[in-house]
Image (tube, helix red, strand yellow):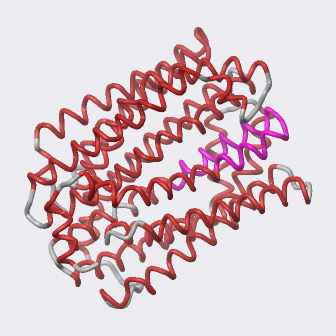
Amino acid sequence: MSATTANDAAVTGRTRDLLRLAWPLMLSNLAYTAVGFTDTLVVGRLGVTEVGAVGLASLAVLTLLLLFRGSLNTAATFVSRAFGAGDGAGVLRWSNVFMTLALVGVPLALAGPLLVDALFALLRPDPAVAQVARTYGHIRMIEAPLVLLGSTSLSIMVGLGNTRTPALLAWLVVILNAVLAVTFVFGLGWGVAGAAWASVIAVCTQNGLAFALLRVLHGQDFGRFRFVRPRRAELASFARVSLPAGLTELGEVSAFTALQGVISRLGPTELAASQIANQLASLGFLPAFALSTATGSLLSRALGAGRPDVATRVGWKGAGVAAAVMGLLGLLFLLAPRTLIGLFNDDPGVLRVGALVLGVMAAFQILDGVAIVLGGALGGAGDTRFRLLVTLPGSWLVMVAGATLFAPRYGVVGAWGAALVYICLTALLYAGRFASGRWRRGTL
């Protein structure tokens, strides 16, 4: 895709252009979620403790990676801005800088087991859950170097308007992970460790191919993708825009991890029900996060092309589509909660508690879609510090502190009720910020 084509797509602001970029990302997100579904379905056959532990460990690993992964994913913002301005040299330079910074994954993997143990020491889950979760988490941290390098490569592709390659690679992971998980867990009898190794192999394959394909597919248009030494001004831009984005994702996901830690102290049944409900809720995150990424990328291109009016239109359209889709999912949660939970586990206690959790989740689906997409829009504009200021106090002081206070009194409904308040607050603040137009002054 040429810079001229990028500009043409950016200045239209049509819903069709937004969906054209978003739908492969929806398939990609569906594949990513399917990996979690596979692990939950497979491990769910081992027992209630195992399914809760694997869900908690997956969140823990994601938490440890997110500061770096969230920061590096802003490569799409920098690349999109240069692409929209027709600056091919800038596209290549920012791509190389971000790939170099992704090498932080090597020391992160080496320190992985110590970091996982430290995080569980803070969360203090049920001892039986903690023992299983540590096994899974230690193995999954091995994937850190390729995850960071591969996700950076995929982010660069998205910034260039190539969302089909990430989608194809994501579905490769689904197939490979499913085959390996069944083989390792049941065929070889490796249990939870087998599920972890299946995910590591599948995820490393995906991200290794992403790094290789970036060079093959886009190197002829922009030049040689390679590791470089970042300049001081580039590091300053990374610190100003990318680090707040990474801290935002880290703050929010670590808060949700802490929320699961609070729930885990209620018992294995409550934790298993919440993890299953989370997997189901991720179905709504698929289009929402895809639209968020597409919205941020198109908005950044529009700003690079000098069209803030189109950028505004793209942001509101993305939020509207996400709200409609997630509203349908919320309706499904209300109509068939026990049927949905029963797909994963038919324990009577899990069915009862899971239905309660889905009822709370149904209440915040629409506003969650608005928050996710407008957050992506602000990120695409480089207005990442505002998101950080909303997320850190909101997720920890409203959601985690509220869950800690209400869970002992009202159980799992009290914990998720605190999450409901946080999500509603975030959506309102993001909408107000976007409506104000202050994000238009964001610079990279």
Instruction: Give the image location of residue 151, x and y in percent.
Output: 48, 66
- Highlighted range, magenta: 36-65
Taking the image as shown, residue 13 lies to the left or right of residue 25, namely left
Residue sitting farthest toward the top: 409
Taking the image as shown, residue 200 lies to the left or right of residue 328, namely right
Q: How many marks are shown on the rendered structure?
A: 0
Q: Work out whether residue 377 or residue 78 is closer to the camera in this orientation and state it.
A: 377
Locate residue 342: give its quadrant. Answer: top right
Taking the image as shown, residue 126 lies to the left or right of residue 258, namely right
Q: Work out whether residue 219 or residue 260 is closer to the camera in this orientation and state it.
A: 219
Query: Which residue is at a point 21% across and 56% down the rendered structure image?
Result: 299
Query: Which residue is at a point 25% across and 58% down the rendered structure image?
Result: 240
Instruction: Give the image location of residue 444, x and y in percent.
Output: 19, 63
Locate residue 370: give its quadrant. Answer: top left
Q: Work out whether residue 223 or residue 307 is closer to the camera in this orientation and state it.
A: 307
Is 258 above or below relative to 409? below
Instruction: Give the image location of residue 359, x and y in percent.
Output: 54, 19
Taking the image as shown, residue 417 lies to the left or right of residue 76, namely right
Locate residue 17: give its quadrant. Answer: bottom left
Q: Is residue 338 magenta?
A: no
Query: Which residue is at a point 71% across and 49% down the rendered structure image?
Result: 39
Is 202 above or below relative to 134? below
Type of secondary structure dominating the magenta stretch? helix
Q: Work out whether residue 382 or residue 188 is closer to the camera in this orientation and state it.
A: 188
Instruction: Give the image location of residue 13, x and y in percent.
Output: 18, 55
Q: Quadrant of the N terminus?
A: bottom left
Q: Is residue 42 magenta?
A: yes
Is 102 above or below relative to 242? below
